Image (tube, rainbow, N blue to C red):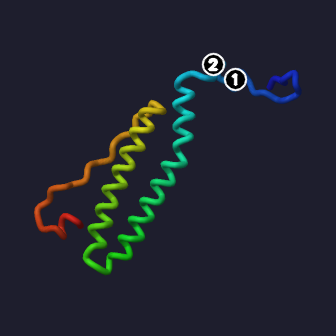
Amino acid sequence: MSVDPRGSDRGGPEERLPPVGFAFAPQTWKEIAHLLTNLPMALIGFVYVMTVIVTGAAMTVTVIGFPLLALGLGGARLLGRFERGRARLLLGLRVDEPSPLPLRRAGGVLQRMW
């Protein structure tokens, strides 16, 4: 192990710091924008999901509860699509789409909901 002149221990050549780059590159600003939008998006998602779950669970004693929960799941999938698009745009990441929901099934409304 080599010793840094300032007195701190440093590892071998495999533990070197990344190369110095320009601090204000466009990708840096995109990453900062992503970090700054994380809190508002998390709050929106949390409020939406909790509202749908609490309202749907309370309404399950009536006929409206289960369809409301199913619609809430569709809205959550839309929020997920938006988040994947935001990650793709700002971070350059490619996140796979989830498997599609089976929309057509033989049977009645209750079998499709199940």
Label 2 crowd bin: few (<14), some (14–19), many (20+), radius 10 Å: few
Q: Are discs 1 and 2 less than 8 Å apart at CB?
A: no
Label 1 crowd bin: few (<14), some (14–19), many (20+), radius 10 Å: few
Whichever of callouts 1 and 2 sits on the residue coming sooner in the sequence is 1
User: Which quadrant of the rendered structure holds the N terminus?
Assistant: top right
Front residue (pair 108, 74): 74
User: Which quadrant of the rendered structure holds the C terminus?
Assistant: bottom left
Residue pictured at 63% horizontal, 19% vertical: 21
Task: Report helix, strand or loop for mark 1.
Answer: loop
Q: Quadrant of residue 65?
A: bottom left
Residue pictured at 55% horizontal, 29% vertical: 29
Left or right of 2? Residue 93 is left
Task: Point out which mark residue 16 bears.
Answer: 1
Three-letter residue code for mark 1: Arg
Q: Quadrant of residue 84?
A: top left
Left or right of 4? Residue 103 is left
Residue pictured at 38% horizontal, 50% vertical: 79
Image x and y of residue 24, in percent: 60, 23
Three-letter residue code for mark 2: Gly
Judge depth for marks 1 and 2 and give the one in front: 2
Task: Report helix, strand or loop for mark 2.
Answer: loop
Left or right of 113? Residue 108 is left
Q: Which residue is mark 2?
A: 21
